[in-house]
Amino acid sequence: MSRTMSAHHDPSNPTPGDASATHPDPDELVARARAMVPILRAREEEAIGNRQVSPDTIAAFQEAGFFRILQPARYGGYEMSPATYCEVAKALAEGCMGSAWVYGVVAVHNWQLALFDPQAAQDVWGADTSVLISSSYMPTGKATKVEGGYRFSGRWAFSSGSEHCQWVILGANMVADDGDGQPEPYNFLVPRSDYAIIDTWRTMGLCPTGSNDIVVDDVFVPQHRVIRERDMFNLDCPGHAANPGALYRIPFAQLFNRTVSTTSLGSLRRALEVFVDATRQKRTTYTGVRVASDTMIQEAVAEVMLTLSDLEARLANDLAELEARARTGDWPIERRAQLGHHTTAMVSRCVEAIDKLMLFSGGKAIYSGNVVQRAFLDIHCARAHVANNPFPYARNLGALAFGFENDCYDL
């Protein structure tokens, strides 16, 4: 696991952070995440009831340095490998998938902010480099161009961790001056004073994520706080000059989409361990035969183990490839489509695996608080995320194989 991805610091441009500052190494960060697992499990029931990760948990993530893993060094970040970021997310998910989801989604915005015009990062972190950002990328906003920026309004759903954040990145479609005349997606960065959070998050799973609605009513967003998604796809972003490290030369979707798939692996691993422990000495009610002797259950456990092994190996290999390609700038569209399909298909395989464990968990699994049931609900909710729908990505990848043009820009 690499320590950093080419952190840079310009001594002629003073910033709140210092790239030369001492920070924990990747193994220490992962160890800190694993040490939090019992704490997250103890807090999980309360977080589900509150439909929010507790402020104490967010503070613990802050103190451990988790949100700084992908943050630019010029603002006190570690500029570490995405592999470290994903290992922390997987470990935290073995404690509470909802808490891990909030970590992953919020932390990735510290990476995306480096792609904006550098003034945007100064707006957010100029006084405090620990400030957090949430998002809702669905392009439901309305933007009207005015002098120096845009008037911006709208309502967005699914802003995970928004209660703990002071800024939000929101989506809207606009027609670009140099585009093809069709609306295309842009991201708008908005401060907490300019939006309201509406409590709507009442769901069957991922309850602690507090993924509530965001409402913006006719506010001004300066041009430097707006980024075109096509620029992120083309790896031609306003922030690249200020943040030249290879970490920021990874296509946006290749990293963000792994944000919403990786935590399912940790949740599935926890469910498998709990299932095996609970089944080991369990006996059938009528015959007294050991449940673990059932060959169908044995086969199901073996299949789930194989799924975890396959997906974790695929994730590690893909992350290593993303880093290598970021250093060389070699991003053939066919390979991007393959890598994109890899991550969007992950949660579907986790769904198949957790369904097997739920099927053989018996009547007690229907009671609230059952760990396998909780993973079942959380992983199914993760599958509902648009970035975890494998079918558009598979269709595009298959079309490329037949010689059709790429028509997916979420790669």
Image (tube, grey):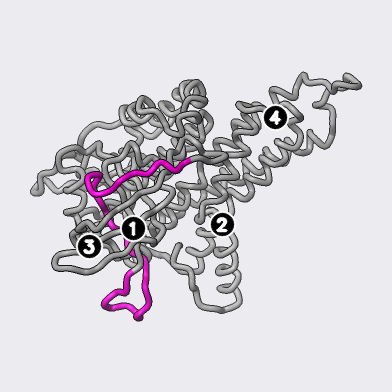
Q: Mark 2 points at which residue?
A: 389
Amino acid type for the residue under numbered disc 4: Ala
- Specify the label residue 365 is tagged with: 4
Q: Which comes sooner in the sequence, label 3 or label 2?
A: 3
Task: Give the spatial CA distance, label 1 vs label 3.
Answer: 11 Å
Where residue 99 sits, quadrant-wise, is top left
Judge by depth and name the residue closer to the eye, 173 or 235.
Answer: 173
Q: In this view, does 13 lie to the left or right of 83?
A: left
The x, y position of residue 100, in whole percent, is 46, 36
Any part of residue 98 in sight: yes
Looking at the image, which residue is at 51% across and 44% down?
A: 262
Q: Do the residues labelled 1 and 2 touch (CB within 8 Å)?
A: no
Q: Which comes sooner in the sequence, label 4 or label 3?
A: 3
Q: Give SS at disc 2.
A: loop
Where residue 72 sits, quadrant-wise, is top left
Pointer 3: residues within 10 angstroms few (<14), some, or many (20+)? some
Q: Give SS at disc 1.
A: strand
Q: Of the residues tagged 2 and 4, which is closer to the observer?
A: 4
